[in-house]
Amino acid sequence: MMKHVLVTGGAGFIGSNFVRYLLRVEPDVQIINLDALTYAGSLENLQGLPHERHVFVHGNITDRTLVTELFEKYQIDTVVHFAAESHVDRSILGPAPFIETNIVGTFTLLDVAREKWAGRQDVRFHHVSTDEVYGTLAPDAPPFSETTPYDPRSPYSASKASSDHLVRAYWHTYGLPVSLTNCSNNYGPYQFPEKLIPLMILNALQGRPLPVYGDGQQIRDWLYVEDHCEGIYRVLRSGQEGETYNIGGGNQPTNLEIVQRICALLDELAPAGAPHDRLITFVQDRPGHDRRYAMDTRKMQTELGWQPHESLESGLRRTVQWYLEHLDWVAAVTRKSDFKDWLTANYDQRERKQQ
Ligand code: NAD
Ligand code: DAU
C-alpha cells in the first residue's frame, strides 16, 4: 500500500527530487510534503507540481500535534523521511539544530507512527540516511557494507547514526514496519550551494576562489540524485521490512579531482578567457575530516536490481548545465537564506595553505 505518502524535508535537495520522481512513477499517489523551510528548503524547489496530488505543509517534524493531525487527516500509510540538518560544516559550527531535528524530530515521527499504525503491517516508515554513519576508511580498506559497525565522527553523522538506531529500535521493539537506506554523496539539480559541487560551480562562475579543504585528497563516492530517488523507491516497493540497504555511485574520485572536472566542464560550457582551475585555493581543513567513504551496493543490486544510470562524467555534465541554466534559482534560494553570512562564518577564518 502506498497511497498517502508523508514526505518530510520534501522542499530540500533530495526530497524535492524525490517528490518529482514519485509523482512521475506513481500516478495515483498523493504526497503530503512536510517541511520547515529552513535555509536549505525552498518552495522554489517545488514549482509547477500538481496541487491535487502534492500538498505542501509548512511545519516542523518535532511538532507532535501537527504530525499527528497529518497522519489522521490524510490517512498516511507511508513515510519517507528526508528532513534533516544535512551540512557537516554547519554541524561543526553549531550542532544544536542537528540534535533537535535529526534525533528528536526522527523520534517524534516514529512515535506518532507507532501510535497511529498500531498493529498494521500494510504501512512503511522509510528512513533516509547516510554513509557517514560508518566513519572513515583507509585507502585500501574494503567499502562499507550494511553490517559495518557504526563509527560516526562529526555532530552531523552522530545525529544521523542516533536516528538510524532509533528507527531500528522501533522495528525490534514495537514491530513498526521500517526500512533504511544509507547513501553516499548526492549531487544534481536543486542542491543548495553550500555543498562542494554547486559551491565550486558558482564560485568559479563568479571568479571567486575555489576553497579545497586540506590537501584535497579526501575521497567521496558520488551519486546522481535521481539514481538515489530510484533506489529509495525500489526499497519502498520491494525492500524487506527491518532491512538496511546501502546506495552509492561506485566511484572514488578525490575532492581535488571533482573540482578539476568542474573547472574543465566550465572551460567548455562557460569559457572565461582563462582556465577556471587557476581559482583553486587550498584552505584549512575541516576538523575531524573523514578521509574516505566507499559503498558496497551489492545488496541493492542483487535483491532489488538497482544500479545507477548516470556515470560521474555524465552526471557532472548534466549538473553543471543545470546550474548554468538556473542562475535565477540560485539567486532566489541564496537571497532568502543566510547564505552570505554562512560564507563569511565558514570561509573567512580559514587560512590559505600552500600545496
Ligand atoms: P537538505 O539540507 O537539502 O534538505 C533538508 C530539508 O529538510 C530542507 O527542506 C529543510 O527545510 C527540511 N528540514 C530541516 N529541518 C526540518 C524540521 N525540523 N522539520 C521539517 N523540515 C525540516 O538535505 P538533503 O541533502 O536533501 O538531504 C536529505 C536527507 O538525505 C537527509 O536526511 C540527509 O541526511 C540524507 N542524505 C543526504 C545526502 C547528500 O549527499 N545530500 C547523502 C545521503 C543521505
Ligand atoms: O556522504 C554523504 C553525505 O554527503 C551526506 O550525508 C551529507 O548530508 C552531505 O552534505 C555530504 O557530506 P560531505 O561533507 O561529504 O559533503 P560536502 O559537499 O560538504 O563536502 C564534500 C567534500 O568536499 C568533503 O570532503 C569536504 C570537501 N569540501 C567541501 C566544501 C563545502 C571542500 O574541500 N571545500 C568546501 O568548500
Image (tube, helix red, strand yellow):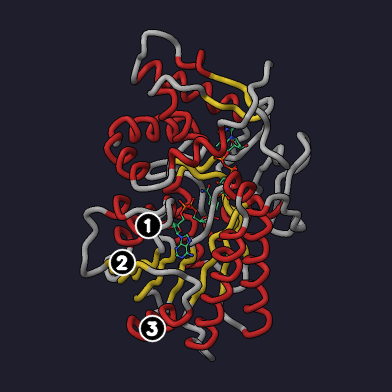
Q: Nearer the viewer, residue 303 or 199?
A: 199
In the picture of the structure, the residue carrying the numbered disc 3 is 69
Residue 11: x and y, percent? 37, 57
Q: Assess mark 1: CB under 8 A from ligand 1?
A: yes
Could you say where residue 242 lies in the image, as x and y percent from the top left?
Answer: 62, 73
> Label 2 near label 3: C-beta < 8 Å?
no
Disc 2 vs disc 1: Cβ atoms closer than 8 Å? Answer: yes
Would residue 254 be visible to someone looking at this image?
A: no
Q: Earlier in the sequence, mark 3 or mark 2?
A: 2
Q: Does residue 332 lie above or below 47 as drawn?
A: above
Q: Indicate which disc, 2 or 1, sits on the residue closer to the N terminus.
A: 1
Q: Which mark is residue 179?
A: none
Q: Which residue, given by chain and number where applicable, does mark 2 sit on?
A: 56
Q: In the rendered view, would you say 7 is above or below 141?
A: below
**Which residue is farthest top?**
273
Q: SS at mark 3?
A: helix
Tell me the residue at 43%/45% (across/down). Answer: 338
Q: Which image quarter is the N terminus in?
A: bottom left
Residue at the location (42% across, 51% down)?
39
